[in-house]
Image: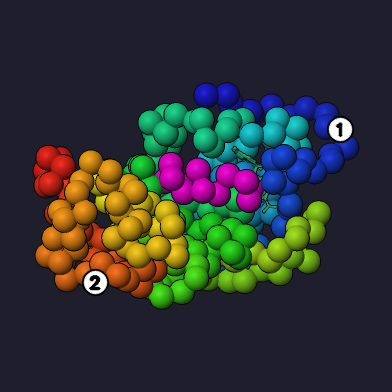
């Protein structure tokens, strides 16, 4: 793990599109996000993508310790200088890629679950969520900013256009709700779309578990693979080794109309179905 503790002279900075560098430049919004998080002087917080410190600096003034993972070495130097100038010595900047970092090592900075904050680069929001879900037993409350369209999917309810596989896979692990809409003019460079801050509380997962998680994922992804098809036809594509009759009887046993589309089914429906299909596939509970 690369530590970035020294202060070096820095070159003028040009935002890099490929790293999703749209910096939050509205201090009022930064303060609102930090204040909403409820993080206190006793907490150590993981920040993903600190950039120029729009969240890091106010956060460092409020919490015990910030462990921030930044991929851009130029920004690491820039932010180290800034933290030094402002007299903060409670921020550990790690020059790492959050998608490649060793979470076992990261975990050592934290006594219990890992509280997270971040204005996520738009191009890695799904893989970051996937990592967090994979390590959900280590994660605490996460206050994350997403493109509004992604946030809408995370917080969706059955029946809507934005409700889909991402909704279910995340809400299985964490309670999700929208916190604050942030207009695109609050960033530099100005992005094409507005953003939304979402709270994901991994200490409040969906209260019911359903069979084997791999089967749950397969059912959910399969059911939404063709949004316009019926749930039966979509599942037939995902469970090719299963006969139409056995899928029909699994749906009937769960009280699910096979002619319905996946978008009207609730989490509990998917969990019942994945429990049954896990048994049918010999995966067990
Ligand atoms: N937190 C800052 C703010 O709100 O202004 C910066 C947010 S900017 C949208 C995303 C930040 O994540 C950038 O600093 C970018 O360099 C960094 N970043 C991009 N990809 C990353 C990765 N894979 N791992 C860690 N940081 C990454």
Q: Seen in the image, is 174 located left or right of residue 126?
A: left
- Disc 1 within 8 angstroms of ligand 1 (CB): no
Secondary structure mainly formed by the magenta segment: helix
Q: Is residue 123 magenta?
A: yes
Name above or below for residue 156 compared with residue 63: below
Q: Which residue is mark 1?
A: 11
Q: Which residue is at 64% across, 64% downward?
A: 195
Circle nearer the N terminus (2, 1): 1
Q: Which residue is mark 2?
A: 257
Q: Is there a contact, CB below 8 Å, between mark 2 and mark 1? A: no
- Asked if residue 158 shows in the view, the reply is yes
Q: Which residue is at 34% across, 48% downward?
A: 237
Ligand 1's quadrant is top right
Q: Which residue is at 76% across, 43% downward?
A: 17
Residue 37: give x, y in percent of width and height: 50, 63
SS for callout 2: loop
Depth check, mark 2 against mark 1: the one in front is 2
Q: Which residue is at 35% across, 52% downward?
A: 222
Which picture quadrant has residue 241? top left
Q: What range is drawn magenta here?
A: 121-132
Residue at the limit of the structure toward the right, as seen here? 12
Q: Is residue 202 magenta?
A: no
Q: Seen in the image, is 152 located left or right of residue 168?
A: right
Residue 152: give x, y in percent of width and height: 53, 67
Q: Nearer the viewer, residue 115 or 213?
A: 213
Q: Nearer the viewer, residue 63 or 203?
A: 203
Q: Seen in the image, is 204 located left or right of residue 65?
A: left
């Amino acid at each position: 793990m690369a530590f970035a503790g020294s202060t070096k002279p820095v070159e003028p900075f040009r935002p890099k599109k490929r790293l999703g560098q749209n910096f939050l430049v509205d201090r009022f919004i930064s303060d609102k996000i930090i204040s909403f998080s409820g993080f206190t002087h006793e907490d150590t917080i993981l920040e993903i993508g600190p950039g120029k410190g729009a969240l890091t600096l106010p956060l460092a003034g409020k919490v015990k310790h910030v462990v921030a993972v930044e991929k851009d070495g130029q920004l690491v130097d820039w932010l180290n200088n800034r933290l030094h100038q402002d007299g903060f010595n409670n921020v550990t900047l790690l020059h790492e890629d959050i998608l490649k970092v060793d979470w076992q090592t990261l975990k050592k900075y934290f006594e219990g679950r890992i509280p997270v904050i971040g204005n996520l680069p738009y191009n890695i929001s799904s893989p970051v969520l996937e990592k967090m879900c994979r390590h959900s037993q280590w994660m605490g409350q996460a206050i994350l900013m997403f493109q509004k369209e992604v946030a809408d999917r995370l917080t969706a309810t059955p029946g809507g256009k934005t409700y889909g596989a991402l909704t279910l896979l995340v809400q299985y692990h964490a309670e999700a709700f929208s916190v604050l809409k942030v207009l695109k003019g609050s960033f530099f460079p100005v992005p094409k779309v507005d953003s939304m801050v979402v709270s994901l509380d991994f200490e409040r997962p969906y209260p019911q578990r359903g069979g084997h998680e791999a089967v749950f994922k397969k059912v959910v992804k399969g059911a939404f693979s063709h949004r316009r098809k019926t749930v039966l036809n979509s599942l037939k594509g995902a469970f090719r080794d299963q006969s139409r009759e056995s899928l029909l009887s699994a749906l009937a046993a769960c009280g699910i109309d096979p002619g319905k589309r996946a978008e009207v089914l609730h989490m509990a429906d998917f969990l019942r179905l994945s429990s049954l299909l896990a048994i049918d596939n010999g995966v067990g509970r």
